[in-house]
Amino acid sequence: MTAAENVCYTLINVPMDSEPPSEISLKNDLKGDVKLKTEALKKVIIMILNGEKLPGLLMTIIRFVLPLQDHTIKKLLLVFWEIVPKTTPDGRLLQEMILVCDAYRKDLQHPNEFIRGSTLRFLCKLKEAELLEPLMPAIRACLEHRHSYVRRNAVLAIFTIYRNFEHLIPDAPELIHDFLVNEKDASCKRNAFMMLIHADQDRALDYLSTCIDQVQTFGDILQLVIVELIYKVCHANPSERARFIRCIYNLLQSSSPAVKYEAAGTLVTLSSAPTAIKAAAQCYIDLIIKESDNNVKLIVLDRLIELKEHPSHERVLQDLVMDILRVLSTPDLEVRKKTLQLALDLVSSRNVEELVIVLKKEVIKTNNVTEHEDTDKYRQLLVRTLHSCSVRFPDMAANVIPVLMEFLSDNNEAAAADVLEFVREAIQRFDNLRPLIVEKMLEVFHSIKSVKIYRGALWILGEYCSTKEDIQSVMTEVRRSLGEIPIVESEIKKEAGELKPEEEVSVGPAQKLVTEMGTYATQSALSSSRPAKKEEDRPPLRGFLLDGDFFVAASLATTLTKIALRYVSLVQEKKKQNSFNAEAMLLMATILHLGKSSLPKKPITDDDVDRISLCLKVLSECSPLMNDIFNKECRQSLSHMLSAKLEEEKLSQKKESEKRNVTVQPDDPISFMQLTAKNEMSSKEDQFQLSLLAAMGNTQRKEAADPLASKLNKVTQLTGFSDPVYAEAYVHVNQYDIVLDVLVVNQTSDTLQNCTLELATLGDLKLVEKPSPLTLAPHDFANIKANVKVASTENGIIFGNVVYDVSGAASDRNCVVLSDIHIDIMDYIQPASCTDAEFRQMWAEFEWENKVTVNTNIVDLNEYLQHILKSTNMKCLTPEKALSGYCGFMAANLYARSIFGEDALANVSIEKPIHLGPEAPVTGHIRIRAKSQGMALSLGDKINLSQKKTSL
């Protein structure tokens, strides 16, 4: 282990601005009163931590500070003796340390339990066997002290001494086993049991066997260690499983959530029996429901999702879907989102009915809740989940549709749009449900508040009303929605009627009103009440048209044309046919008249005029070709779109299932547990070890087969080969931390003293600690580690220099400037997916846009898109079908999310300039949008750097 990797026990904050005191002034202060001695000792500790040696002060501290009984001084002395050099340059123990050893022997027999306990803690950090040897009898005696604080620290001291210098206390496991049998305090038992696990597993198992029935009565800290022992034993020796699995089952009932979580995780690794998986999953679900912390809920939900990934466990979890849905009582949207996704993945024909009943209840609940910002999003999630259930299990659609269609009149447009999309798909797929859907649609039609939903509803009614009665009902609803016609004349009459002064104006006293901001506003004595009433009384469709939204009029014209053409084919009487057509044409004409008048807030657009005029022409001529186009082709387009969507979903599901299915090749060897050697059995990954490595950021990622993708690819040269000090850094990115492992090589024949790596950062990076100085022998090398925290997705730069003194030289400090280290944004960006609606919404909301001009040597459009996807870690949201074929241009939407939760959107618009020949490179633009400026700029820089394809 290098010096930089030694375990650090004590962190001390050092004020940088103070001038270091001289050795003489420190000596005088150490001879003064207690307050002066305390301050001087603190300064000495800081100076030693900064690399000063101060050998002259050792004897002064032993004479004037060590005998004091002051508790603060004693605490500071423990830190001082931990860090001070205790050996001579040739490795022999300093003579003065004998006096220190004697002082600590007295402290181990001190009547105050705090001094005894903290001294025992200090002894855990000593690495000199000669210092520890005289103290062994005193340490053993502390095991029988009346106070638990002393006893538990004595156990820890014995454990570390046994681990480092077994010869000093060879009977430690036996001693601790006897101590454990008679001990009553939970923390002492935990420490003793932990020592036995690591020092003598057999004794630990013997103890556990004697008290295996009382495990539930132990404290949670001891239960956690027992779970760890059982896991390790069964991991190394699977034949022991039967002996301990009952104990793990019992620990699932523990009162401590941490013990339940660990026990459930261990049970899953020990047994794959359905009863074990069910018990563990039930335990996880209880934890999610009872724990109040959302982070805990999300972590445990992830464990349930991991369980589901195993094909044999999925069947067990399917029976627990209803229990999993109890988690929906949590108000957090992220937890609800994961729960609904998990339930949807597990739903089967056996439990889909119960699932739909629960989801319907949840949807109705959201209607009664006072509006919260997440309520709308939650309702949307529920609608989408019900949509997916109905598509997978068509029998459920009849139950779901009536409840959901109530939400078409909802104020929240997003949820209503999801319902509409679902209804459109259901009415196309399920012929038997068409009458029900049309009936419900006509019921809620008048109460729809959003113009977008209104347009969709009009389209559905126009497309799927097939009986004479339904067609007449649609016409009645449209007339009711438009109000009195002709619109222009009736509106002018209303205006004229409202201008009569005796009806309109009422005179009253002037009133002072307090506004929301607390200021006064004076209301006029002439108050008008009629116009407000007029706004409320206006039918919905008339309101949309007077607001200037004529796109809905174009949609209405298409609907009227479809139902009129259908009515003509259904009814034989010429008189009825003509009267229905005339009514439809009158409605269109009156809308055109309104559009051209000055009454609407915005005039009608030319596109809408063209569409309404075309519909009028179609109705006046009634040609068979137009009849086919309006009544057959439109539905076929929808049918094609839905089948393409379904194909895509099936394909992605197939890929998922292929990933999960464990395929066994014909020639693969079959492993029998009974015939497997012990060392092979233990080759499976140890979960405790893995979680510890993950916490330290040392997760062993599977390296790619490509040698360029290995660690060497991340080594940055910081200085030149001819510099006196050569340095290179390996940049290891672990989510929010960056670890710089810098190799420093002394290329001179001199000893370099106080060789310090000085670093500074640019961007959203923060250096956690200053690397400590080193002394480098001639042609020696050392590793220095520096930690940097990352706060956001932005290109960061780390720069700095190496400064050092040459021993014996009188000149100033020498300095070697290092090259800049650029932190790559790609380490934080991961591909993600979102719906088209979410993409459009984010595109409209995000204010930072970066437009990058395409400048590349790639000649193929698809190849360029794949190259951009690979170099930016983004995911293409545009389906493969839309990108296939060749037409000389391409548009695609890309999306990614950073580990900090920031979204990045990009739109690629590229074309192939055919007039420049087949070898002409791709041209166009990439527009990037993000919430933060840094993200948009960094992603743009990344695209600019990697646009051109390098030839290998």
Image: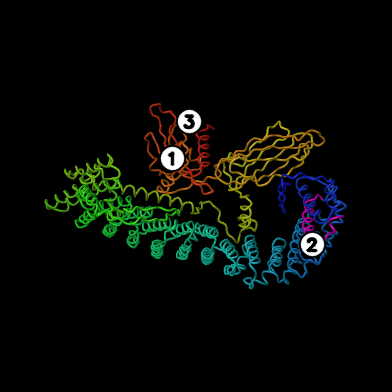
Q: Is residue 69 magenta?
A: yes
Q: What is the three-letter code of the residue carrying label 1? A: Asn
Label disc, if present, on residue 170 of the rendered structure: 2
**Three-letter amino acid code of the residue under disc 3:** Asn
Name the foreground residue: 404 vs 54: 54
The disc placed on residue 907 is 1
Read off the magenta span.
63-85
Q: Which mark is residue 857?
A: 3
The answer to whether residue 352 shows anywhere in this view is: no
Secondary structure under badge 2? loop
State the image quarter where residue 673 is shown.
bottom right
Is mark 1 in CB contact (under 8 Å) with mark 2?
no
Give x and y (percent) for residue 750.
79, 35
Q: Nearer the viewer, residue 892 or 364?
A: 364
- State the SS at label 1: strand
Q: Residues within 10 Å of mark 2 (few under 14, many from 20)?
A: few
In the image: residue 772, left or right of residue 661:
right
